[in-house]
Amino acid sequence: MAHFITDECTNCAACEDECPVGAISEGDGKRVIDPDTCTDCGACVEVCPVDAIEAP
């Protein structure tokens, strides 16, 4: 199950740059994680400045 980004996202893109598989992209006002690409490595969680990324 993939990590997901909450509505607390400020769309800063820190997580997108950190994702080793390119699963994160810009969505409608926030970043989104492609569940089919995400490997649940958690790298994005560590760099999110507003703690907007959660595990399933």
Image (cartoon, rainbow, N blue to C red):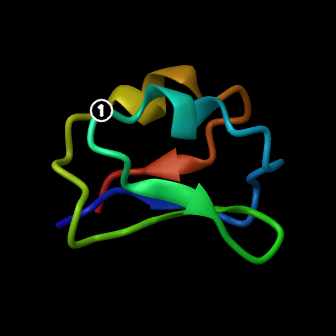
Q: Which residue is outermost to the bottom? A: 28
Q: Position of residue 36 (x, y in %)?
A: 21, 72
Q: Position of residue 21 (x, y in %)?
A: 27, 43
Q: Position of residue 47 (x, y in %)?
A: 55, 22
Q: Residue at x 71, y 26 (%)?
A: 49
Q: Relative to residue 21, is residue 19 drawn left or right?
A: right
- Quadrant position of the N terminus in the picture: bottom left
Is 24 located above or below residue 14 in the figure? Answer: below
Q: Nearer the viewer, residue 41 or 54?
A: 41
- Quadrant position of the C terminus in the picture: bottom left
Is 48 located above or below residue 7 in the figure? Answer: above
Give SS at disc 1.
Answer: loop
Give the tally of numbered discs. 1
The quadrant where residue 20 appears: top left
Q: Relative to residue 12, is residue 17 drawn left or right?
A: left
Q: Which residue is outermost to the front? A: 22
Circle 1: residue type: Pro
Is 5 located above or below residue 10 in the figure? Answer: below
Q: Residue at x 46, y 26 (%)?
A: 18
Q: Residue at x 73, y 66 (%)?
A: 7
Q: Position of residue 45 (x, y in %)?
A: 45, 33
Q: Nearer the viewer, residue 22 or 28?
A: 22
Q: Residues within 10 Å of mark 1 (few under 14, many from 20)?
A: some
Q: Residue at x 54, y 40 (%)?
A: 16
Quickly name the residue at label 1: 20
Q: Relative to residue 1, is residue 34 drawn left or right?
A: right
